[in-house]
């Protein structure tokens, strides 16, 4: 990824007045935020703020009740994650979503086969397909998994499983990648290693934007260009890390220690 762009650049991705209701419960209310070309945006908030619902909506797993989701100028609300991946947006999940009986090589080759629309029987010729193998090896190299290519996924450490899940998302050649707590369940010592690998891999792969949902404020402060804070399904603030971490009341609201009056995003 490149340095954060000028504020007046056209958004690469944007949610516009997105609301999502489940019966009488309104999980999201008029949420708007955007990602500029080259930005790393973190979505933060206390439990129940609507963070994962928002990511599910913008990645097509849920259709918004009202509002628009636009990617590279096109409405993508409700198109579904498969079609969205083909258009250039992919997602890595909070819970590791890998095939435990497959090797790292086979897992990445399946993801590449999906991108290339070889979906009839992607397992049949994984070993014999030079294109799949070359791409799987390239992605493993970028994500620091080359030495583990022949290792069964279930035998990986938790940190390596996280990297494999992220690598599978990278295998789809996304322009934008969304990360739902990419370091959850990982030891403190491994968190920064994973994030450094992820950011370097994004630059090498030509990823143009990253959106992450994250609770770890140290990671949010270190890697974000902007922070979007949610509370009770609404945008509490959209601001730079410098402004966010200079505001004790904002930090208290995000970590859920006490309520905070909503403010308009910048």
Image (cartoon, grey):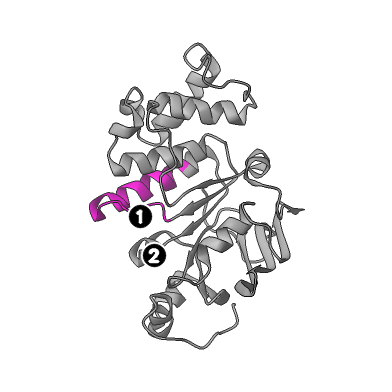
- Where, quadrant-wise, is the C terminus in this rendering? bottom right
Pointer 1 with pointer 2, Cβ within 8 A = yes
Left or right placement of residue 35 versus residue 136 in this view: right
Tell me if residue 82 comes above or below residue 115 in the rendering.
Answer: below
Magenta-drawn stretch contains 171: no
Density class for disc 2 (Cα within 10 Å; few <14, some 14-19, many ≥20) is: many
Name the foreground residue: 146 vs 44.
Answer: 44
Farthest residue toward the right?
74
The residue drawn where x is 57% and y is 36% is 173
Span highlighted in magenta in the image = 181-201
Assign a secondary structure to mark 1.
loop
Assign a secondary structure to mark 2.
loop
Q: Position of residue 219 (x, y in %)?
A: 36, 60
Return the disc, 1 or 2, that comes first in the chain's sequence.
1
Tell me if residue 254 comes above or below residue 202 in the rendering.
Answer: below
Left or right placement of residue 265 versus residue 247 in this view: right
Tell me if residue 102 comes above or below residue 160 in the rendering.
Answer: above
How many numbered marks are there? 2
Give the residue pinned by disc 1: 184
Identify the disc placed on residue 215: 2
Query: Would you identify the image quadrant in which residue 56 lies?
Result: bottom right
């Amino acid at each position: 990824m490149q340095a954060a762009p000028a504020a007046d650049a056209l958004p690469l991705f944007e949610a516009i007045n997105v609301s999502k209701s489940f019966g009488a419960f309104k999980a999201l209310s008029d949420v708007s935020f955007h990602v500029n070309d080259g930005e790393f945006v973190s979505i933060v908030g206390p439990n129940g703020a609507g963070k994962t619902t928002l990511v599910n909506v913008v990645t097509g797993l849920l259709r918004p009740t009202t509002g628009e989701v636009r990617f590279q100028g096109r409405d993508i609300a409700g198109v579904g994650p498969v079609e969205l991946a083909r258009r250039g947006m992919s997602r890595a999940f909070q819970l590791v979503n890998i095939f435990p009986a497959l090797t790292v090589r086979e897992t990445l080759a399946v993801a590449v086969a999906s991108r290339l629309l070889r979906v009839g029987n992607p397992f049949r010729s994984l070993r014999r397909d030079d294109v799949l193998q070359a791409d799987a090896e390239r992605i493993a190299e970028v994500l620091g998994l080359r030495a583990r290519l022949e290792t069964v996924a279930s035998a990986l450490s938790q940190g390596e499983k996280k990297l494999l899940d992220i690598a599978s998302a990278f295998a789809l050649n996304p322009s934008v990648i969304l990360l739902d707590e990419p370091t959850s369940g990982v030891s403190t010592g491994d968190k920064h290693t994973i994030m450094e690998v992820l950011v370097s891999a994004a630059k090498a792969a030509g990823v143009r934007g990253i959106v992450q949902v994250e609770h770890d404020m140290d990671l949010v402060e270190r890697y974000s260009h902007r922070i979007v804070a949610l509370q009770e399904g609404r945008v509490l603030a959209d601001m730079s890390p410098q402004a966010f971490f200079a505001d004790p009341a904002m930090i208290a609201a995000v970590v859920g220690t006490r309520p905070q009056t909503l403010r308009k995003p910048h």
